[in-house]
Image (cartoon, rainbow, N blue to C red):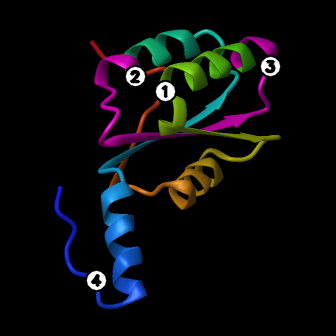
Amino acid sequence: MKWPAIHKFDEFQEIIYQKTMKKVSILISTYKSECHIHRAIDNLQCIYDKTDVEIVWVANDVNSIEDEALKRAALIFGSSIKIIHVQRESLYSSWNRAIEQSTAEIFTIYNIDDYRF
């Protein structure tokens, strides 16, 4: 890839930002989700595109089953997943927190109890 001519440092920062920004953020908020979390991770693997998608996961009041599943997700998705642990907050607060952490051009909300086929 050929880099354009740079005249100012601000232009350089903007080019780097555009090249590292993902296209889509998948926002997830969970609370007491142990019966759905493994299937959700499996489903995310089917739609996951390492180059264009990031996952921002807000985990509310995590139990041991959820914690193990989130560790598995971190191994699978690597640097393309952000897992944010919180004590307990409303669904909308979790979504707002995820939006603030998102770096993509657009976002979508993924409810882990909505199965994708």
Q: Which of marks 3 and 1 precedes in the sequence?
A: 3
The amino acid marked with disc number 4 is: Ile
Residue that carries the numbered disc 2 in the rendered image: 44
Mark 2 vs mark 3, CA separation in Å: 21 Å
* x, y percent for residue 92: 59, 51
Q: Nearer the viewer, mark 4 or mark 1?
A: 4
Q: Which residue is mark 4?
A: 6
- Residue 71 visible in rendering: yes
Callout 1–callout 2 Cβ contact below 8 Å: yes
Q: Is residue 67 above or below residue 5?
A: above
Mark 1 lies on a secondary structure that is helix
Distance from disc 4 to disc 1, alpha carbons, whole Å, reads 33 Å
CA neighbours of label 2 inside 10 A, class few (<14), some (14 to 19), many (20+): some
Q: Crowdedness of circle 3 by 10 Å Cα count: few (<14), some, many (20+)?
A: few
Q: Nearer the viewer, mark 4 or mark 2?
A: 4
According to the picture, the residue beneath numbered tag 1 turns out to be 77
**In this rendering, would 30 be left or right of 21?**
right
Residue 73, quarter of picture: top right
Q: Residues within 10 Å of mark 4 (few under 14, many from 20)?
A: few
Quarter of the image holding residue 16?
A: bottom left
CA gap, disc 4 to disc 2?
38 Å
- Where residue 80 sits in the image (x, y, percent)? 47, 38
Q: Which residue carries the number 3 mark? A: 63
